[in-house]
Image (tube, rainbow, N blue to C red):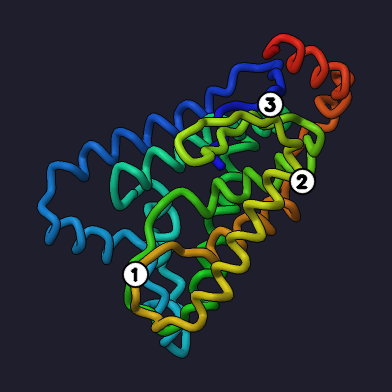
Amino acid sequence: MIPIRDCLPRRYTPYMTWIIIALNCIIFFFELMFSREDLNYIFHIFGIVPAKYMLIETLPFHPLYYLPFLTSMFLHGGWFHLISNMWIMWIFADNVEDKMGSFRFLIFYLLCGFGASWIHCLINPTSMMPTVGASGAISGVLGAYMVMFPHARVITLVPVFIFPLFFAFPAIFYILLWFFIQLFSGLGSLLTPADVGGVAWWAHVGGFLFGILLHRIFVIKKRLHIYDDHFDYYCAWRKFL
């Protein structure tokens, strides 16, 4: 199922969402300048390598040692990795930022990414494979969106053989389905060797849970009831039709 758009209007301009998307794209274009060998080296330096943090007795206090928890969120392993992450960000992040404000949303986004990376490290403590991508932080955005806008409609493309069919699913259904796919895929990944590359399923699960737990801290209370949500869902849905 491929999300096409949601039917939830926003009140404010999502500047921070746009900046984060633009920054990810700019950094990716710089990545294209490097050879595969050089890029792998960059990923090992600026990506999350779980063994680097989990296989030592005492973690150092030097801030630069933890820099990869930030830089890894702005690196991507390929075109599909980048486009899929930024597409989800484009659809869902603007409404979350709408309720938080730009600066609060940035802090929320980064904290979800940090939390997702730590969960990945805890589940894969001996892995030497670097993990990069914004998906852990974006999973936190999905968690916040699901809790704040459970009845919003997500227009979704469902290919049936060669026929593209479009359905409007409630956000809570679409996002919970996505979450359980991540969870069961993560459970399946525990049966594979730690250094086999692939999707960081547990980072997705961790980021999602952090988003649910943290979003209330960052929401601006006066923005919670600016307008009646159900009326907006109805108006947006009628406009789409």
Q: Is residue 138 above or below residue 47?
A: above
User: Which quarter of the figure is the N terminus placed in?
Assistant: top right
Q: CA distance from mark 1 to mark 3?
A: 36 Å
What amino acid does circle 3 point to?
Asp
Asked whether the beta carbons under mark 2 and mark 3 sit within 8 Å of each other, the answer is no
Upstream in the sequence, badge 1 or badge 3? 3
Q: Residue at x 63, y 43 (%)?
A: 141
**Residue on which the image places disc 3:** 98
Q: Secondary structure at mark 1?
A: loop
Q: Residue at x 58, y 75 (%)?
A: 187
What amino acid does circle 1 point to?
Gly
Q: Nearer the viewer, residue 71 or 228?
A: 228
Q: CA distance from mark 1 to mark 2?
A: 35 Å
User: Which quarter of the figure is the C terminus placed in?
Assistant: top right
**Residue on which the image places disc 2:** 217
Q: Is residue 13 above or below residue 83?
A: above
Q: Is residue 23 left or right of residue 33?
A: right
Res 21 quadrant in image: top left
Q: Nearer the viewer, residue 5 or 123?
A: 5
Is residue 102 in view?
no
**Residue 197, disc:** 1
